[in-house]
Amino acid sequence: MLHWGVGVQQVVPLVFKDLVPVELQFGISWPAVIEGLLLGIVVSILFTVLPLISVRFVPPLTVLRTDFEGEKVFSRARIVVITLIVLFPVVSAAYQTGKFVYGLSFAAGIMAALGLLTLVALAIL
């Protein structure tokens, strides 16, 4: 089965051969494929574990009765997961660029963008 990405890689050199002054060669980089899969799996696990940690302390009476309030439970696992979620973009960007400063800059840029999006959402509301 031919995937879209592989098909596009075959068509791009033909379409742009008159515009690009060098010979283009495209191929599948298996280390990049594996790295992308690993990064996707880690991100999926990190963002899936956080809601699951919160659910494990919900008493059954909370589900059955609306007037029952469960007690708040302090969870070190939740703090660890939130710390990993915050650190992951820094570590990932530092690994890909080879410089820790770039990882910090990337994470700061993400936080600034999310902050601006939050302000825009609050302004719209």
Image (tube, helix red, strand yellow):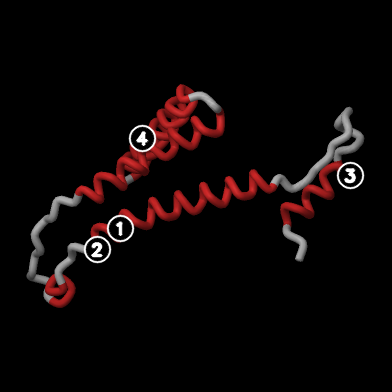
Q: CA distance from mark 2 to mark 4?
A: 27 Å
For residue 95, side relative to residue 3 (left or right): left
Q: Residue 35 in the image: state x and y as whole percent.
A: 58, 46
Q: Is residue 51 above or below residue 62?
A: above
The residue pinned by badge 3 equals: 14
Q: CA distance from mark 1 to mark 4?
A: 22 Å
Q: Label 3 sits on what residue type?
A: Leu
Looking at the image, is mark 1 or mark 4 earlier in the sequence?
1
Do callouts 2 and 4 mark residues in contact (Cβ within 8 Å)? no
Do callouts 3 and 1 mark residues in contact (Cβ within 8 Å)? no
The residue pinned by badge 1 equals: 51
Assess disc 2: are there few (<14), some (14-19) or many (≥20) residues with their C-alpha within 10 Å of its C-alpha. few
Assess disc 3: are there few (<14), some (14-19) or many (≥20) residues with their C-alpha within 10 Å of its C-alpha. few
Name the image quarter holding residue 48.
bottom left
Numbered disc in front, either 3 or 1 = 1
Describe the element under mark 3 as helix, strand or loop.
helix
Q: Residue 32 in the image: state x and y as whole percent.
A: 64, 44
Q: Please give the label number shown on residue 115.
A: 4
